[in-house]
Amino acid sequence: MLRLTLDMDDVMADTHEKLVSIVLNDFQSTLDKKDFEVKSLRELLHPKQLTRLHKVMNEPGFFANIQVKKDAVETVYKLSRFYEIYVATAAMEFPNSFKDKFDWLHKHFDFIPWSNIVFCGHKSIIHSDYLIDDHVRNLNAFKGEGILFTAAHNLQDKTYRRVSNWKDVAELFLPNK
Amino acid sequence: MLRLTLDMDDVMADTHEKLVSIVLNDFQSTLDKKDFEVKSLRELLHPKQLTRLHKVMNEPGFFANIQVKKDAVETVYKLSRFYEIYVATAAMEFPNSFKDKFDWLHKHFDFIPWSNIVFCGHKSIIHSDYLIDDHVRNLNAFKGEGILFTAAHNLQDKTYRRVSNWKDVAELFLPNK
């Protein structure tokens, strides 16, 4: 059975959407929601705002309450019949997020066993056939075949095979019926 | 640079020693300290005692205060000049231990960057040249070369190259001067 590893933020969880609504609601920003669809937070925000956002992300509870990406649960469930599913998420940058992320996965993806969850910094440590991730730097570090999940910060990349949503993932990885 | 991945419990940290003193001090056990040097906790304890010990291990703080194995810090520091050092520890079984383990590593091995710490269930996910671990099942799952760190529960194994302490690790992995 081939192994398929999934990144969590902005692949399984709509972390970007939560960050954007925090900026729009709490940061007295003059930006429009549309701006965040085509440019990264790093491009749009002032360094001071990025630092503030980083602090918000490290507060206990931030990662516990994030929306699941559309069609993710059903698709991952179907994929789990054909692939060994792992989740690899970079929790080390936010040391308060471990438990929240673990609980979030258990709540929304309870069919993924705890033994298949990985918290790591560098994705180069992941031994897997495939990795679906929204960061080009993670796919560059990864030794297997990387698939880029579309996000505002990776629209320019032409290096990796791209999926824009979970319907695309299903089409790419599930056998045709 | 070759990558050398280290298990934490009973390789870097003397977790067994802490568990044994809890059993001897709090469990009204008639066993002797010597018993725990040659037999595993699983062999020596009643299933109810093992359940109780499991609960103790899942209490916040348990993993924050464990002795470092003799010569571990100096040896890992020397090894970090010749190898890319990663730490891979199975925190998923104890979801309250993430932060404690992370803080423990930062306290005792602050020269290992957070990006090189991995919390995982199965060690089969680890992409590394070497893994030093005290569990034969972890080395079996691992795709690189496994080195067995001696512990009471693995004395019978003849499959893997064995190190009994950090002096042995230094001898095996550091270049001769």
Image (cartoon, coloured by chain):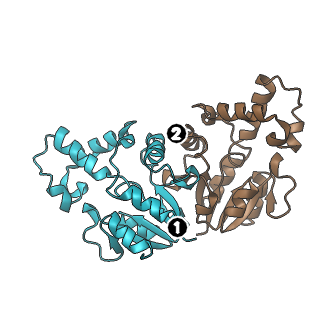
Chain colours: A cyan, B brown
Measured as percent of width and height from the top left, residue B87 is found at 60, 53
Question: How many residues crowd around disc 2 within 10 Å: few (fewer than 14), some, or many (20 or more)?
Answer: many
The residue at which mark 1 appears reads as A83
Q: Nearer the viewer, residue A7 or B104?
A: A7
Q: Quadrant of residue B37?
A: top right
Q: Quadrant of residue B39?
A: top right
Measured as percent of width and height from the top left, residue B114 is found at 50, 50
Question: How many residues crowd around disc 1 within 10 Å: few (fewer than 14), some, or many (20 or more)?
Answer: some
Q: Chain of mark 1?
A: A
Residue B31 is left or right of residue A25, and the answer is right
Type of the residue with mark 2: Lys
Q: Residue at x 80, y 52 (%)?
A: B150
Residue B34 is left or right of residue A173, and the answer is right
Measured as percent of width and height from the top left, residue A167 is found at 33, 66
Q: Residue at x 17, y 44 (%)?
A: A24
For mark 2, give the secondary structure. helix
Type of the residue with mark 1: Tyr
Mark 2 and mark 1: span between their CA atoms? 31 Å
Tell me the quadrant of the picture where the C terminus of chain A can be found.
Answer: bottom left
Q: Is residue A6 visible?
A: no
Q: Residue at x 75, y 40 (%)?
A: B16
Q: Is residue B96 visible?
A: yes
Q: Chain of mark 2?
A: B
Residue B99's label in the rendered image is 2
For mark 1, give the secondary structure. loop
- Residue, far front: A177
Tell me the quadrant of the picture where the N terminus of chain A can be found.
Answer: bottom right
Which dot, 2 or 1, sits closer to the camera?
Answer: 1
Q: Looking at the image, do the residues carrying marks 2 and 1 touch, with CB atoms under 8 Å apart? A: no
Residue A52 is left or right of residue A80, and the answer is left
Q: Residue at x 71, y 30 (%)?
A: B52
